[in-house]
Image (cartoon, rainbow, N blue to C red):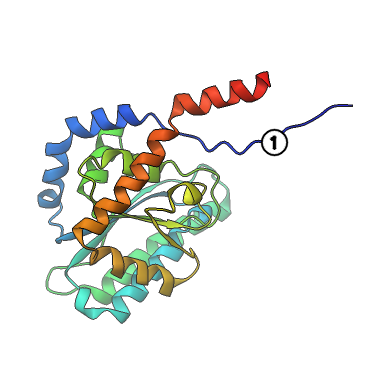
Amino acid sequence: GRKTRIAVMPLGIDVDRWKDISSLVRPVAEALAVKYRLANQIILGIDRLDYTKGVLEKLHAIEYFLTVAPEMHRRFHYVQISQPPQSEEEEYSRYAHQAEDKIKEINKRFSTDGWSPIIHLDTKLTLEELAAWYQAADVLCVNSIRDGLNLIAKEFVSCRQDEQGVLIVSKNAGCASELSQGALVVDPRSPSDISGALNKAINMPVEEKRRRMTAMRHVIGWNQLHDWALGFLKQALK
């Protein structure tokens, strides 16, 4: 005897807050490349070491990219910022160890003349530190196997007031449909697909970056956190 309504309402973020934080930490962002002795291009991954986030699959894609595009060696660093899985179950712990072992394997295979392709930072960052990395990165790669939201992609976009940077996002990430006008959308299980997107992102012209980023910034501006909350109230009052 009841009617149930289902509404698709993607979660927004507090865009103004991220803009303010990113403005404050811009000098920190500019110093990160020097601090970690990074190459000209920075590919960033910020993930829990959780099998739903596709970290291991992303690492296989990095390995594939290094194999098929040797001319890219020394031109970039992939910075993997890892956080521990939310569960202490053995399956999660095993996946985290596999990812860590894969990073060591790739670095051992491809390191040359003091350059190792992957820098692994196993730490939980503050909002200020996150905003700094979002601005320092040339590319953010979000490779979720299945993911309800993935706000990291939206945080990255909100911090890019310079309208630069490229977002690579899995087609299975919750934000993929919202950000598809500007992001490079990939199959998270396909090393060749991700590798092709990495190559395109690294070589993307400035104007194309600006066009894509502007499109994504418009989208997240239309659906901010307070809009999401008000949307629920409007649906409830219908």
Q: Residue furthest top?
A: 237
* Res. 184 image quadrant: bottom left
Residue closest to the eye, 173 or 55: 173
**Is residue 122 in view?**
no
Q: Seen in the image, is 104 located left or right of residue 2? A: left
Residue closest to the eye, 109 or 168: 168
Residue closest to the eye, 75 or 4: 4
Q: Seen in the image, is 123 located left or right of residue 138? A: right
Q: x, y percentage for residue 99?
A: 42, 61
Q: Is residue 142 above or below residue 19?
A: below
Q: Residue furthest right?
A: 1
Q: x, y percentage for residue 10?
A: 53, 38
Q: Name the quarter where the C terminus is drawn.
A: top right
Residue pictured at 26% horizontal, 55% vertical: 209
Count of marks overlaid on the render: 1
Q: Is residue 85 above or below residue 231?
A: below
Q: Name the quarter where the N terminus is drawn.
A: top right
Residue pictured at 27% horizontal, 78% vertical: 69
Q: Amino acid at mark 1?
A: Ile
* Res. 104 image quadrant: bottom left
Q: Which residue is mark 1?
A: 6
Q: x, y percentage for residue 83?
A: 39, 45
Q: x, y percentage for residue 55?
A: 43, 58
SS label for mark 1? loop
**Is residue 37 in view?**
yes
Residue pictured at 59% horizontal, 25% vertical: 232
Residue pictured at 43% horizontal, 71% vertical: 193
Q: Residues within 10 Å of mark 1 (few under 14, many from 20)?
A: few
